[in-house]
Amino acid sequence: MTRDIGRRRLLGVAGGAALTAVLAACGSNTGRNGKGSGPELSQWYHQYGEPGTEQAVKRYAAAYGKARVTVQWRPGDYDRQTAAALLTDSGPDVFEVNGPKLDQIKGGQVVDLTAEIASARDDFNQAVLAPKIWQDKVWAVPQTIDTQLLFYRKSLLKAAGVEPPRSVDELVEAAKALTARHRKDKVKGLFLGNDGGAAVLGGTPLFAAGLSLITEDGKVGFDDPAAARVLGKIRQLYADESLLLGAPTDWSAPAAFVQGLTAMQWSGLWALPQVRKALGDDFGVLPFPKDGAGKPAVPVGAYSSAVSARSKHRAEAKAFVKWLWVDGTDKQEDFALAYGFHIPARTSLAKKAKQLREGAAADAVSYATQYGHAEPLLWTTPSSTAYQDALNRIIKGGANPESELKGVVRKVEAELQRAKK
Amino acid sequence: MWFWAFVGPFAIGLGLFTYVPLAWSVYLSFFDAHNTVTPTDFVGLDNYTAMLGDDAFVSSLGTFLLFTAFIVPATYVLSLGLALMVNRLRFAQAFFRSVFFLPTACSYVVAALIWKLSIFNGVRFGLANTVLGWFGADQTAWLSTTDPPWYWLVIVTVRLWLQAGFFMILFLAGLQRISPRLYEAAAVDGARPGWQTLRYITLPQLRATSVAVVLLLVINAFQAFDEFYNLMSDARGYPPYARPPLVYLYYTALGQEQNLGLGSAGAVILALIIAVATVVQARWFGLGRKED
């Protein structure tokens, strides 16, 4: 039996369905994890690749008794998601931040956490804490430290008669020799990322040449002939065709290295368990080698926990951050080492962690401690973009490093003037 | 009442999500709007002069002009060619029409990732390198090589694959509107089928369709974002040599710098360029003019 559906009936049914959907959505899973009493706090994390991390942070949130904490695990372009959300009232109360950047601090988007971190301030790794400080106030609490390293395959270097490189010149020669030795297998000497290293290396070659991005007294730190010299050597790696380019995964994943596409790769500490699982003892790690009178260098950085200035429960959010990342040392250690592989931001925890005491992990911790450089707070996005664009033109286009750097120095000086206002 | 019941929600949506943000963006462009959408520091035309004096923005305009110069004629020729071929088919026309149209259903993001990870990756097991390897060629880092700029091949082919089918359908519709009598009359007058018929009958009859297609192609090219972003960017940023304006503005306004005033000024400049180019083009092709 068929029955015609009239226009009114159709609209009525559609309206009813829409209302039902709205009501169902209201009652659906809201991602709420906290079981405590008190106000509701929203906490955002970027998506970690390591299994178990999401469950861990939800477990920490659920264990907090003074507020009901909702965890949002946000895949995609997290930094831009949070930057946009902080402009609205619907953003997070507590959030992970790869910063905060100076403009976020000066724009009043994050709140002062100096009092919260005070009881343990000296125990936090000072290199990663420094960029969180502006006008003597701490604006975020570091969670875990990450660093980057030069992974090398011992057997491939041995077969080519190459020693692990201790200077940039040796790195250039080693990459060339390894590429030539393994030309038949199409194995390249070195992988610095699919763009030849412009994005990932950043200031590291400058640190290795004894320079800095911004000096301690707030001036351009690479207006020096050594900067052009060391960047010219990075260009040499590209010109020699010693670099692996166009790998399916970029520098942050160790796939190219463990699949045997390259003999050496610049990657992150987080890749160490995966490399060890695939290659056993057939690998070692090094810092970026020194150039001239400089020292070896590794970049260090830390995702940190910050409180949004637009939060309606700022005091409660600050208390939660203190409970989780300052007082909760067990949670910090668990978060850093039980799922992925990071260095706890508290020095005392890093020292006593069993997983960090031997082999390549111990080397990595020692490099991060001895040779670690964090990007200074005054290194703003326009400065970084200008520098990276120049690096791209130097490495891939063969542009003159001296003239390119002159342009960057001018841009950074202008940015410093703006930032210091 | 029924008119407003049906049109109202869309009109409200259009106003709320298109015209209000547009007007707000113009407003922001006259202010120092770092990390805020409700700024207080009026800076006049400073953002505009800063944007027009910014080498990166100016070079991004050059990038999209180059991209437009590649993609518009390439898509036009390919989609017209496909339409002519499909139109002549006596059998399985619907099948081939669907086959060529199907890529239109694929998202730019997915297609870009397939191009980047499977076809044009730079290692020995990438599809393009495997095929070239059979002929003894060395592996090529398609997206990382600037000399020669192979990345353009990747960017252009992905868009061609995605959009040629759609424009083929427009041309097919245009072709099917041409009266067969015209071809018969031409044949009686001694016109040879092929180039002569195409030149003197088909193309003039497709004039209105061609104008619309070129207009849409130019606007599409100006708005290029997804394939550039997904093919060329990494977690840290974007190479300067293939950065179209929308990608640059995305980083300026929505990056951690969050310079929404400067980004808005760039968006207004870009919108003006697109508007002027569209009007000039429409006048040039006589869009909307009554057929003679």
Image (spheres, rainbow, N blue to C red):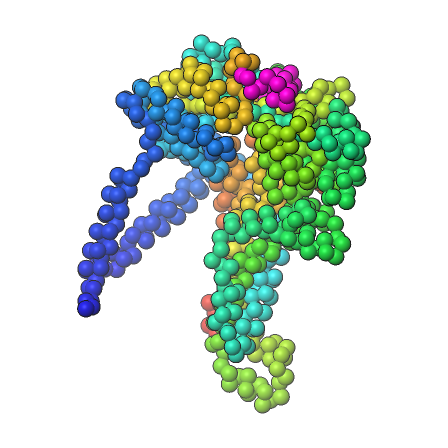
**Which quadrant of the rendered structure holds the N terminus of chain B?**
bottom left
Across and down, in percent, residue A98 comes to: 51, 27
The dominant secondary structure in magenta is helix
Side of B260 where A12 appears, left or right: left
Above/below status of B244 relative to A41: below
Side of A228 where A134 appears, left or right: left
Q: Quadrant for residue A307, please give it.
A: top left
Magenta stretch contains residue A372: yes
Magenta stretch contains residue A390: no
Question: Image point 58% across, 85% down: which residue?
Answer: B186
Question: Image point 54% across, 70% down: which residue?
Answer: B83
Between B25 and A362, the residue placed more toward the observer is A362
Side of A185 where A267 appears, left or right: left
Above/below status of A151 relative to B282: above
Between B183 and A72, the residue placed more toward the observer is A72
Give the magenta part as a residue range.
A353-374
Across and down, in percent, residue B52 comes to: 58, 41
Above/below status of B2 relative to B34: below
